């Protein structure tokens, strides 16, 4: 009864698949009757829990095809619907009181009728799409529940002697079946085919054996020729040669399999083995190649640098791992062709699990003892140390799995043990492959940029490694039991996007936004560079004005680029108005200082009380303005240190600008002479010194001021205007040197403070006489 139901089920599913495929090849309308029947049939199969996982997958495929049609139909007539809505809005809202003009009412009714007719197919398609999406989710849940039940089921124990005889019997029958397929005495035509194809078989065998056993040697010779190029691309050449060393033997295996087919002796079972032989060979050669990249014999090329003996052991255990994983694949292939009893399958798989567990444990032990070169040298390098910790953590995980999985298989939970052991091994291999590709990308980057091995520490290889890890996530998910259907469903949900209000944002929208904004941003920067280098220097604007124009253009350009990108992506910001209004209150309080600085930055660029290159003093800090950004202004002090001043302080505070508008500034140099000196003579000497300075302006002329009768000296001041106040310290230095030389030559004394000390009772300071008390 059940078999008949499943046969009918499969027939109907194939029929629906043919209908959907025919509809996909034409523009025929969707057959909703066929969809309803398929949906009802699928829901019945889910509710009654009938059918195998493969049959459910077939049903799922038919539902997915319909869902894709529904998704397309949901967006049909979108442009026309939008135009009708705009027309209805143009008529204005219906009056709440009174009557509407007959012409307007008639037109509104016509437009609303057209709108309903255009929306009807989309509404029906949307309802069907939601039902299909729910059915697919139920199928996935049913399959996951069955997989969970299978993993947790208790099977036959391979340690039971009663199961050994069953295994021997099944293996004997399988071997006899394979031998019977290759027995040419039962089929004389096979022997005739072998005689006719003997020459080509011999040639193919010789070529294949040459490639298998001599291919690596030839690849090594080619590598020596490439290494003669040397230089900074040696890592790239080494990687290519290593690939060539597995490519030639793999071609040899392909030719070997074809030679066996040409003999005509292969039966159905042997043909399956020959089909899988290149895959197994590629896996074996690939793991050997990976082990030689991770634990290379050459220390400079090893990705995981260990002592020589440890690297050799790691390569050996990876070889054992690959051989027994291929052996497990061979057993699984034979079991799929010649049905074996579960007891025989458990006994056959258990030794393989034991050996794989041992190889994984020993490999994990080696990785657990890994120390980065920086750690070996006693240095504290965060990135290197973190990578070493990850490798040691992976080693500990491998050891734990290697212990738990064989124990579970021995008890009878073989499926759970396999679901833990094999994914762990595949995960280690995938991550090792990612490390290899990341190193290759770094070497390619070093070859292109000419940095060589130094490029391995650059930013690009690190970003490339991050991208490779993201790309490896689907492979890791498949290794741990995820179905391809699960990944495609995730991708379909991702491409459909998510709703924000009434607007659906998809990855295509993000891509459009990123491309348009990048183009607008790049165009803005190009225009800024053109103005700064070619146009503005030819105008009469000063440097501050030019910088203000360039900065303002940058702000406007980035704003327009973002606005155009949002419009091109089809993002309706009106749906975010309420949310943005609510958030703006909190943002206003939390970011009021930043907003104040931003507005102050705009004021500085427009009003330009200070400009780049000005010498200013603000808040006790004196220096040159080097950059005016959106939030703050950078001032370089005379100590060559940068002071970051918020723009609000420059607008609301007191700022001294020494070079605003022009660089003319005044210098005052005070000097004192002894009492009794001829003051007119001093005035003439100081005037001559001031006029001798090349930086001093003649208009206004220098001034010598007899400033004061000081406590210790007659005080004078040299007051001069400099054509460039930035030289004030240098001019002060030259004037002081000239004063010292002239006064020494003229015999004029520069006094220093002198004081007379009077003691009120000096006799009290005398030492007491001897004998007095």
Image (spheres, helix red, strand yellow):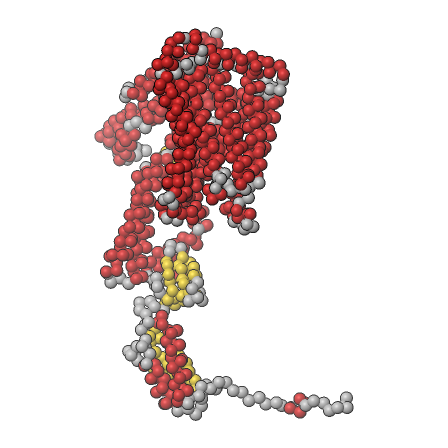
Q: Quadrant of residue 274?
A: top left
Question: How many numbered marks appear?
Answer: 0
Quadrant where the C terminus is found in the figure: bottom right
Q: Decide: is 307 above or below 642.
A: above
Between 219 and 769, the one lying in front of the other is 219
Image coordinates of residue 491 in percent, x first then y, are 40, 30
Image coordinates of residue 637 in percent, x first then y, are 42, 65
Between 127 and 449, the one lying in front of the other is 449
Q: Residue at x 29, y 60 (%)?
A: 545
Q: Residue at x 43, y 29 (%)?
A: 213
Q: Decide: is 712 above or below 624.
A: below
Between 146 and 218, the one lying in front of the other is 218
Q: Residue at x 41, y 14 (%)?
A: 265
Q: Decide: is 54 above or below 714.
A: above
Between 614 and 249, the one lying in front of the other is 249
Q: Quadrant of residue 414?
A: top right
Q: Quadrant of residue 470?
A: top left
Q: Residue at x 25, y 56 (%)?
A: 534
Q: Is residue 707 left or right of residue 531?
A: right
Image coordinates of residue 734 in percent, x first then y, are 38, 78
Regarding residue 572, the answer to whether it shows in the image is: no
Regarding residue 513, the answer to whether it shows in the image is: yes
């Amino acid at each position: 009864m059940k078999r008949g139901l499943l046969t009918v089920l499969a027939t109907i599913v194939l029929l629906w698949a043919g209908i959907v495929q025919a509809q996909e090849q034409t523009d025929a309308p969707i057959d909703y009757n066929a969809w309803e029947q398929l949906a009802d049939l699928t829901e019945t199969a889910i509710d009654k829990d009938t059918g195998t996982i493969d049959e459910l997958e077939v049903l799922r495929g038919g539902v997915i095809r319909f869902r894709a049609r529904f998704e397309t139909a949901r967006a049909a007539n979108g442009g026309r619907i939008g135009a009708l809505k705009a027309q209805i809005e143009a008529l204005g809202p219906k009056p709440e009181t009174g009557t509407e003009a007959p012409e307007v009412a008639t037109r509104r009714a016509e437009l609303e009728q057209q709108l309903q007719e255009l929306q009807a197919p989309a509404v029906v398609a949307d309802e069907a799409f939601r039902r299909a999406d729910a059915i697919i989710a139920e199928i996935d849940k049913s399959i996951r529940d069955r997989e969970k039940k299978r993993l947790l089921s208790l099977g036959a124990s391979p340690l039971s002697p009663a199961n050994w005889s069953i295994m021997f019997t099944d293996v004997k029958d399988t071997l006899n079946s394979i031998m019977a397929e290759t027995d040419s005495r039962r089929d004389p035509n096979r022997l005739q085919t072998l005689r006719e194809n003997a020459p080509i078989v011999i040639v193919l065998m010789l070529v294949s054996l040459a490639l298998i056993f001599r291919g690596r040697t030839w690849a090594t010779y080619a590598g020596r020729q490439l290494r003669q190029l040397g230089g900074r691309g040696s890592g790239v050449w080494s990687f290519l040669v290593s690939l060539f060393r597995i490519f030639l033997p793999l071609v040899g295996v392909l030719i070997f399999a074809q030679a066996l087919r040409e003999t005509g002796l292969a039966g159905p079972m042997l043909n399956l083995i020959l089909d899988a032989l290149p895959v197994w060979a590629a896996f074996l050669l690939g793991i050997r190649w990976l082990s030689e990249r991770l634990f290379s014999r050459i220390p400079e090329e090893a990705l995981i640098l260990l002592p020589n003996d440890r690297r050799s052991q790691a390569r050996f255990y990876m070889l054992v791992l690959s051989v027994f994983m291929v052996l497990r694949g061979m057993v699984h292939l034979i079991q799929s062709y010649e049905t074996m009893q579960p007891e025989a399958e458990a006994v056959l798989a258990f030794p393989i699990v034991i050996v794989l567990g041992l190889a994984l444990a020993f490999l994990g032990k080696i990785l657990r003892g890994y120390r980065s070169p920086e750690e070996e040298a006693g240095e504290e390098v965060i990135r290197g140390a973190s990578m070493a910790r990850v490798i040691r953590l992976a080693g500990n995980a491998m050891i734990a799995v290697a212990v738990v999985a064989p124990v579970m298989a021995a008890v009878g939970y073989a499926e759970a043990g396999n679901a833990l052991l094999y994914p762990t091994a595949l995960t280690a291999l995938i991550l090792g492959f990612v490390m290899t590709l990341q190193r290759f990308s770094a070497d390619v980057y070093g070859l292109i940029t000419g940095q060589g091995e130094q490029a391995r520490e650059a930013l690009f290889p690190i970003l490339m490694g991050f991208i490779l890890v993201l790309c490896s996530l689907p492979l890791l998910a498949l290794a741990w039991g995820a179905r391809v259907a699960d990944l495609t469903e995730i991708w379909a949900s991702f491409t459909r996007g998510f709703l924000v209000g009434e607007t659906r944002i998809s990855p295509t929208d993000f891509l459009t936004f990123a491309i348009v904004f990048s183009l607008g941003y790049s165009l803005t920067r190009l225009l800024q560079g053109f103005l700064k280098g070619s146009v503005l220097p030819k105008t009469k604007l000063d440097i501050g004005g030019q910088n203000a124009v360039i900065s303002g253009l940058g702000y406007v350009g980035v704003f327009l680029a973002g606005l155009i990108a949002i419009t091109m992506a089809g993002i309706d910001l009106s749906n975010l108005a309420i949310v943005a209004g609510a958030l703006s209150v909190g943002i206003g309080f939390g970011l009021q200082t930043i907003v104040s600085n931003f507005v102050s930055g705009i004021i500085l660029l427009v009003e330009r009380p200070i400009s780049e290159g000005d010498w200013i003093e603000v808040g006790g800090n004196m220096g040159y303005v080097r950059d005016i950004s959106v939030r703050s202004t950078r001032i370089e002090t005379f100590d060559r240190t940068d002071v970051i001043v918020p723009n609000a302080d420059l607008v609301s505070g007191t700022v001294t600008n020494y070079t605003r508008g022009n660089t003319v500034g005044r210098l005052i140099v005070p000097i004192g002479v002894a009492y009794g000196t001829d003051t007119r003579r001093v005035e003439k000497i100081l005037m001559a010194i001031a006029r001798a300075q090349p930086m001093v302006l003649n208009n206004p002329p220098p001034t010598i001021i007899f400033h004061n009768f000081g406590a210790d000296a007659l005080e004078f001041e040299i007051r001069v205007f400099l054509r460039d106040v930035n030289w004030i310290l240098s001019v002060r230095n030259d004037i002081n040197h000239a004063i010292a030389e002239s006064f020494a030559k003229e015999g004029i004394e520069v006094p220093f403070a002198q004081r007379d000390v009077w003691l009120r009772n000096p006799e009290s300071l005398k030492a007491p006489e001897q004998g007095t008390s």
